[in-house]
Amino acid sequence: MGEIMGKVCSFFGHRQITNTENLRKVINCLVEKLIVEKGYQIFLFGGLGAFDELCYEIVSSLKEKYPSIQRIYCVHDEKYLLPSKRPDYLHKTVYEEFIYLPLAFEYWYKRIYYRNCEMIEKSDYVIFYAKNKQDSGANKALKYAKKRKKEYVNLFDEN
């Protein structure tokens, strides 16, 4: 994979959320504003769960209106770059590209955390749905984004 070119947005949230029509509208409005007003073209995904699925659905729907946007899945293990090695859940979705961001750690949980950190590093804007909960991966990613002074919104706070 080459260098990611263009303005990048990524998503981090909990595996279980209350998927309301209001939350869907807020995300749709926010993502469309990023595309139209701020020129965002690249949307990074990397997780499992309801928030990631919701954001993927919204970006995919907006892709029909804005075909130049790209959905990129950031795998946490290099072997998943091979289509035959991808988990079943990745065969149910369409992405323009799968990428691996090199990590310095081998343990599964740490791989996810450090992959998330790399996604945040590559992002210009980050959309979170993160409750302030000690052991939450989404909350750890939010803390990292704050530490790196990334522009972000936490929609958990908005609802």
Image (cartoon, grey):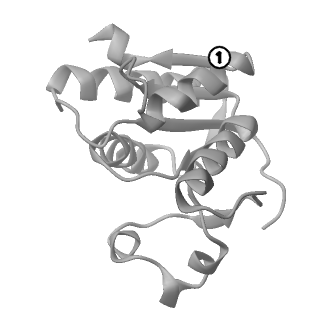
Give me the residue at 83% from left, 63% from top: 2
Give the percent coordinates (x, y) of residue 57: 32, 48
Q: How many numbered dots are placed on residues in this image?
A: 1
**Image position of 20 (left or right of 30):** left
Q: Is residue 75 above or below residue 11?
A: below
Q: Which residue is mark 1?
A: 146
Q: Residue shown at 20%/19% (left/top)?
A: 22
x, y percent for residue 5: 79, 47
Q: Residue at x 66, y 44 (%)?
A: 119
Residue nearer the viewer, 139 or 39: 139
10 Å crowding of disc 1: few (<14), some (14-19), many (20+): few
Horizontal placement of 46 versus 157: left or right?
A: right
At label 1, the amino acid type is Lys
As rendered, which of 39 and 18 lies closer to the eye?
Answer: 18
37, above or below 136, in the image:
above
Residue at figure coordinates x 77%, y 51% from the top left = 4
Query: Looking at the figure, which quarter contains the C terminus?
Result: top left
Going by the picture, which residue comes out furthest to the top? 158
Residue 108 locus on image (x, y percent): 55, 61
Q: For mark 1, give the secondary structure.
A: helix
Q: Which residue is nearer to you in this view: 133 or 66? A: 133
Expressed as whole percent of the image width and height from the top left, the position of residue 127 reads 49, 27
Indicate whether 8 appears above or below 80.
Answer: above
Look at the image and tell me in which quarter the N terminus lies: bottom right
Report the residue that reaches farthest toward the right.
Answer: 3
Q: As rendered, which of 85 and 54 lies closer to the eye?
A: 85
User: To which quarter of the image does residue 39 belong?
Assistant: top right
Q: Quadrant of residue 20?
A: top left
